[in-house]
């Protein structure tokens, strides 16, 4: 079987001694080798940190390109150099680092971010060494102030300590290694690196996201800590995701081999409702104390005389598709299709659900009406549950 070679490039920027090399070692979960390059005709020496991994039949090499010394340049020099660097390396993203003890000049950061945006390169603005100083929040606030000025039309959102500016940039803080304060005898654990990896991944286009995942393929902490979010992002059932990560040598190829469900008229996989036995779970990560239809809404049911036994649902989150389809399969759904929607929210989608018979369709519809009109809680217990011993409905 033939083997292939892939290469990815990432820009890592910031002043010296802000923890750039420590961060990229934490991202890849190994010590990266350092070399130097002038990138063709450029006479400026640039530091390069390289990592190589073999995943199945693919050898993947990642280069992190560090740009020391440009903080003293003027705007034109920075923009021209960044444009040339982007043209020569075609980076997945740019990571800009600043620490509480040595913050950068915001003008230089603004020039670099705007040049990246002009070339459709995602930027991660990271406060490194967050435990080293008390003004770490000031670093984050300054980054956000800069992005608010550059992109006033973007409304930032926050999740897991990360502030997202659409698919343009994110702002967060991390500590790549354990920090020990000997004076006070306090130890602070590494924090925020796994969340940063995930945050960058979900903002990248699919091809770049795959390359990014190959870069972090050896970071087991990331794949286990972020497993729930990753299974949703990659649209892989949670149990299957964990089995692949834990047992398959080439788990990444298996994970990335799953289809993307964003295209119109995509047919989603439906498992037989009898395939797992009468008491099979709808989804391996299902918590039976939580509503499985929390982010969905039924919007139409055809008249009973209709020959096509179909329900239409609006899903408020695309991450719900697999879990939702598995649940409906247990209730008799035969096929689920993505349909064009008039909704302006890019996170919503309209799906069409076909059933095996009309009784199943009506049962789901009627149950749905009850769930949407009343507050209902549900918990799965076995037959010996005490509250059922004396009172029988």
Image (tube, grey):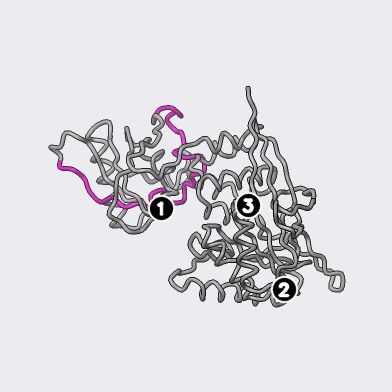
Q: Nearer the viewer, residue 51 or 113?
A: 113
Which stretch is magenta? Answer: 274-303
Which quarter shows the N terminus? top right
Residue 303 visible from this viewpoint: yes
Residue 299 part of the magenta-drawn span:
yes
Q: Position of residue 241 (x, y in %)?
A: 56, 39
Query: Which callout, 3 or 2, points at the residue further toward the start of the chain?
Result: 2
Q: CA distance from mark 3 to mark 2?
A: 22 Å
* Residue 286 located left or right of residue 5: left
Of helix, strand and loop, which one carries label 1? loop
Query: Which callout, 1 or 2, points at the residue further toward the start of the chain?
Result: 2
Q: Residue furthest left?
A: 305
Query: Which callout, 1 or 3, points at the residue further toward the start of the chain?
Result: 3
Which quarter shows the C terminus? top left
Residue 335 lies, with reference to residue 377, above or below; the image says above
Q: CA distance from mark 1 to mark 3?
A: 38 Å
For label 3, the residue is 88
Of helix, strand and loop, which one carries label 2? helix
Image point (39%, 40%), residue name: 327
Q: Position of residue 156 (x, y in %)?
A: 49, 68
Mark closer to the observer (1, 3):
3
Of helix, strand and loop, which one carries label 3? helix
Q: Nearer the viewer, residue 55 or 239?
A: 55
For label 1, the residue is 317
Q: Nearer the viewer, residue 385 or 288?
A: 288
For label 2, the residue is 72
Question: Magenta stretch mostly in which secondary structure?
Answer: loop
**Crowdedness near tag 3: few (<14), some (14–19) or many (≥20) residues, C-alpha within 10 Å:** few
Q: Position of residue 126 (x, y in %)?
A: 65, 65
Mark closer to the observer (1, 2):
2
Q: CA distance from mark 1 to mark 2?
A: 45 Å
């Amino acid at each position: 079987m033939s083997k292939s070679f892939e290469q990815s490039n990432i820009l890592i920027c910031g002043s010296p001694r802000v923890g750039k090399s420590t961060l990229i070692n934490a991202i890849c979960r190994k010590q990266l080798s350092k070399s130097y390059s002038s990138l063709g005709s450029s006479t400026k020496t640039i530091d390069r940190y390289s990592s190589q991994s073999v995943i199945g039949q693919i050898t993947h090499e990642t280069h992190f390109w560090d740009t020391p010394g440009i903080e003293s340049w003027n705007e034109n020099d920075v923009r021209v150099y960044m444009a040339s660097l982007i043209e020569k390396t075609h980076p997945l993203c740019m990571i800009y680092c600043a620490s509480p003890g040595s913050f950068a000049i915001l003008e230089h950061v603004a020039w670099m971010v705007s040049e990246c945006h002009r070339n459709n390169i995602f930027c991660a603005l990271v406060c490194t060494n967050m435990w080293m100083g008390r003004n770490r929040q000031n670093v984050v606030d300054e980054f956000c102030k800069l992005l608010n000025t550059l992109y006033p039309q973007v409304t930032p959102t926050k999740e897991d300590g990360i502030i997202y500016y659409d698919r343009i940039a994110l702002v967060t803080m991390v500590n790549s290694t354990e920090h020990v304060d000997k004076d006070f005898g306090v130890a602070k654990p590494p924090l925020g690196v796994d969340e940063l990896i995930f945050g960058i991944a979900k903002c990248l286009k699919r091809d770049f996201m795959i390359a990014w995942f190959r870069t972090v393929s050896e970071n087991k902490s990331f794949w286990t800590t972020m497993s729930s979010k990753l299974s949703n992002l990659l649209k892989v059932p949670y149990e299957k995701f964990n089995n692949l990560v834990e047992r398959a040598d080439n788990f990444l190829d298996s994970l990335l081999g799953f289809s993307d469900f964003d295209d119109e008229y995509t047919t989603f996989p439906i498992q037989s409702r009898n395939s797992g036995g009468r008491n099979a779970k709808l989804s391996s990560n299902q918590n039976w104390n939580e509503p499985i239809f929390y982010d969905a809404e039924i919007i139409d049911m055809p008249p009973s005389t209709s020959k096509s036994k179909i329900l239409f649902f609006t899903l408020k989150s695309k991450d719900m598709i697999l879990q939702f389809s598995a649940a409906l399969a247990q209730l008799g759904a035969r096929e689920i299709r993505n349909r064009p929607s008039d909704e302006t929210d890019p996170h919503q989608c309209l799906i069409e659900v076909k059933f095996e018979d009309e009784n199943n369709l009506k049962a789901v519809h009627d149950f749905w009406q009850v769930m949407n009109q009343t507050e209902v809680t549900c918990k799965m217990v076995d037959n010996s549950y005490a509250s059922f011993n004396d009172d029988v409905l």
